[in-house]
Image: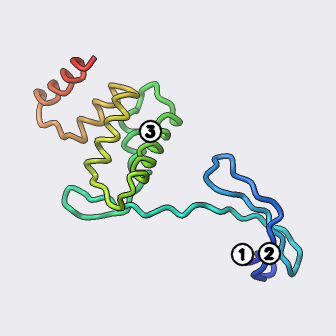
Amino acid sequence: MKCPYCGFVESKVIDSRPTDESNSIRRRRECLKCQKRFTTYEKLESLSLVVIKKDQSRQPYDREKVLKGIITACEKRPISLAQMEKVADDIESELYQSMTREVDSADIGEKVMEKLKDLDEVAYVRFASVYKRFDDLHTFMAELQGLINAK
């Protein structure tokens, strides 16, 4: 680790502890040349995940895109941002735990709908209406009827 003060490349670790979110390690270091202290954060390097779109094009997975869709579906519903972020986090976690480097956008959409169905039925219907591209009132009503019958 290069010292931010003098540029020397050797330092010693004085203290290590996990961050509040427990997704990285905070390390206090001391430069072996100038003796000044500085903080570094060590984070696990994640595998890159590629999304295969409907047109077979590929793009990097973007958690913010998933979260934006969830937020739009949950607009004006009694769902906190923390709950929406947890849904996005759970989906991201499932995707990375699957150990596949490529995932279909349809699989992501299905996961979002599954989570929203458990969280809020109105948000689920909103997301499904865009995701499934209901062509007319009959397909929309069929989805609603399926939701009612599932209860």
Q: Are marks 2 and 1 in contact (CB under 8 Å)?
A: yes
Q: Residue at 45% x, 42% y: name it.
A: 90
> Vertical placement of 144 versus 54: above or below?
above
The residue that mark 1 highlights is 1
Q: Is 33 left, or right, of 113 in this rendering?
A: right
- Label 3 packing within 10 angstroms: few (<14), some (14-19), many (20+): many
Callout 2 amino acid? Ser
Q: Position of residue 29 (x, y in %)?
A: 80, 67
Do the CB atoms of the residues marked 3 and 1 lie less than 8 Å apart? no
Q: Earlier in the sequence, mark 2 or mark 3?
A: 2
Q: Write the residue at 72% across / 65% down.
A: 40
- Specify which label sits upstream in the sequence, 3 or 1: 1
Residue that appears at 31% across and 56% down: 103
At x 20%, y 55%, the residue is 54
Mark 2 neighbour class, 10 Å CA radius: few under 14, some 14 to 19, many 20 or more: many
Circle 3 residue: 87
